[in-house]
């Protein structure tokens, strides 16, 4: 059977292709020459499966999408607090090229606007890094995220430098506040080169899927970012990644995202999928018109909004049964599904409201797909309390969902066979 996902993406792309408003980024001469009707959509799962339609393999420059990944690199190298001292994480409400700096310190409002992105670029590699050394580190990061070697469009880089007056002004202002310490011209040149790295929508989907996969590239298996770094990065992307339309984006799409004036948009939904679109027609905010429309459609149709309320996990305790009789009777609790905080709370409430009468208790995890962090702690605490109440508690866990099952009293739970 063929997967219906490509057919669905084709349907979405065809519906959105009718939109012809907006125009390419004309203020960069090379970008102004791009065919405005190019249009690609790609989606990558956290296990590395890639779906794409249209012009998803057409190369274009990454532009401001690189800001998110370079910010992650700066945090990875220096730590959150050191980067925060130079760049804040507050939504600016301003266009991407505004001088959104704190009045007294000169610190940029967030790393997704140009002032913040120039600053985070200059942080990479530390104070002794050369401009080319910084770029090479950033280029290596982008290649790791994509899982392949990425080229640079020198024509776009030169075109950006020919028209970089505003970015140079921003860099000189940052230098006046000692936010950056290198030559503004060198920093802006290397930053423009960062923005000129060539990618496809397929590359961007895989890069976004790396974020969705807690920082591990789904195909190569290479860890690019730590889990805490990804959580922080996605939070900033959600609130600041779409510039002065960030509020509309959170309300209508609800996926951490980053756009670029090359026509790309990425979105990463933790634990699920990375999405990318490419369409050069931009709106007044500098975001791809068709790309925004695609994300709105996917979020609505597939329930991808972060605030989408899932049905409550009412069947975590799938069943209970008693095996044997008399003093040898064992009360078996069969758990199922993916158990997070709310699911674990239901298990604890069930045990509190209807405690087992039998002395022997077994917890069967055969139907459980995974136990999220807090659920593990809560379940082990429930078992500890059952022991304190005089029960002998055993575990049925053939798939190893609950390894090193120590409820906190130093005694690992004894395993019973699944046939019990």
Image: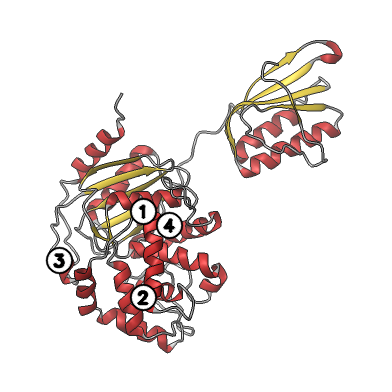
Check disc 4 and report the residue beneath it: 238
Check disc 1 and report the residue beneath it: 146
Q: Could you tell me which secondary element the residue under label 1 belongs to?
A: helix
- Identity of the residue drawn at 52% across and 68% down: 77
Figure check: 391 above or below 162: above
Residue 262 appears in the rendering: yes
Residue 163 appears in the rendering: no
- Find residue 147 and report its horizontal and vertical position in percent: 37, 52
- Identity of the residue drawn at 25% across and 57% down: 288
- Identity of the residue drawn at 43% across and 82% down: 180
> Which quadrant would residue 176 be assigned to in this image?
bottom left
User: CB of mark 1 within 8 Å of CB of mark 2?
Assistant: no
Q: Could you tell me which secondary element the residue under label 3 belongs to?
A: helix
The mark closer to the camera, 3 or 4, is 3
| Residue 36 falls left or right of residue 339 | left
Measure the alpha-carbon separation of dots 3 and 4: 28 Å
Check disc 2 and report the residue beneath it: 132
């Amino acid at each position: 059977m063929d997967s219906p996902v490509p057919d669905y993406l084709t349907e979405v792309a065809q519906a959105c292709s009718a939109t012809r408003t907006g125009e390419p980024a004309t203020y960069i001469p090379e970008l102004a020459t791009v065919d405005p009707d190019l249009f690609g959509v790609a989606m990558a799962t956290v296990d590395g499966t890639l779906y794409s339609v249209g012009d998803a393999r057409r190369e274009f420059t990454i532009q401001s999408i690189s800001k998110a990944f370079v910010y992650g690199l700066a945090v990875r190298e220096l730590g959150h607090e050191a980067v925060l001292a130079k760049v804040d994480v507050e939504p600016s409400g301003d266009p991407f090229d505004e001088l959104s700096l704190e009045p007294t310190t000169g610190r940029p409002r967030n790393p997704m606007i140009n002032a913040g992105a120039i600053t985070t670029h200059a942080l990479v590699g530390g104070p002794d890094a050369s401009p080319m050394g910084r770029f090479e580190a950033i280029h290596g990061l982008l290649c790791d995220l994509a899982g392949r070697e990425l080229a640079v469009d020198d024509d776009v880089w030169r075109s950006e430098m020919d028209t970089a007056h505003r970015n140079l002004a921003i860099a000189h202002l940052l230098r006046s506040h000692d936010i950056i310490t290198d030559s503004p011209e060198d920093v802006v040149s290397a930053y423009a080169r960062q923005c000129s790295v060539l990618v496809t929508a397929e590359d961007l989907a895989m890069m976004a899927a790396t974020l969705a996969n807690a920082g591990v590239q789904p195909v190569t298996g290479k860890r690019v970012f730590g889990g805490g770094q990804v959580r922080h990065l996605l939070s900033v992307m959600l609130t600041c990644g779409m510039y002065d339309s960030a509020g509309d984006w959170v309300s209508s799409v609800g996926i951490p995202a980053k756009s670029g004036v090359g026509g790309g948009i990425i979105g990463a939904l933790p634990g699920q999928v990375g999405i990318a679109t490419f369409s050069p027609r931009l709106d007044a905010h500098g975001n791809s018109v068709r790309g925004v429309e695609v994300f709105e459609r996917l979020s609505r149709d597939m329930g991808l909004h972060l605030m989408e309320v899932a049905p409550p996990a009412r069947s975590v305790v799938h069943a209970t049964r008693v095996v044997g009789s008399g003093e040898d009777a064992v009360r078996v609790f069969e758990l199922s599904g993916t158990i997070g905080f709310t699911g674990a709370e239901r298990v604890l409430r069930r045990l509190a409201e209807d405690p087992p009468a039998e002395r022997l208790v077994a917890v069967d995890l055969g139907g459980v797909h995974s136990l999220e962090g807090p659920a593990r702690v809560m379940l082990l605490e429930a078992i500890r309390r059952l022991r304190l109440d005089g029960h002998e508690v055993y575990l049925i866990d053939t798939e190893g969902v609950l390894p090193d099952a120590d409820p906190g009293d130093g005694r690992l739970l004894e395993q019973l066979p699944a046939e019990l």
